Image (tube, rainbow, N blue to C red):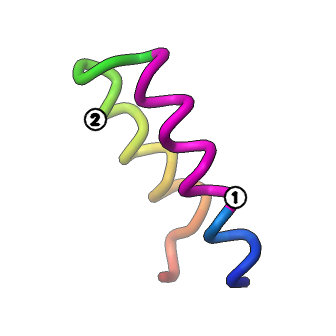
Amino acid sequence: MQIKVSTVKSHRRSIMKKLGLKGKNEFVKYLLLKMPKM
């Protein structure tokens, strides 16, 4: 799980840069759909 979290964090930086602030909401929804149980 730790490795996956690290990958997600790294991926998040890439996604945030691509989508920008407007994509932040969409990314949060994506995370909630991917990992409903945190």
Q: Secondary structure at mark 1?
A: helix
Q: Is residue 15 magenta?
A: yes
Give the number of the disc on residue 7.
1
Q: Is residue 9 magenta?
A: yes
Give above or below for 29 relative to 1: above
Pointer 2: residues within 10 angstroms few (<14), some, or many (20+)?
Answer: few
The residue that label 2 is drawn on is 25
Q: Amino acid at mark 2?
A: Asn
User: In the rendering, at what x and y percent does residue 2 appear?
Assistant: 68, 83
- Bounds of the magenta span? 7-18
Of pointers 1 and 2, the one earlier in the residue sequence: 1
Instruction: State the count of labels.
Output: 2
Q: Amino acid at mark 1?
A: Thr
Q: Nearer the viewer, mark 1 or mark 2?
A: 1
Q: Quadrant of residue 35?
A: bottom right
Q: In the image, what residue occupies the spot 34% across and 23% down?
A: 23
Q: Quadrant of residue 27?
A: top left
User: In the rendering, at what x and y percent does residue 22 appear?
Assistant: 24, 18
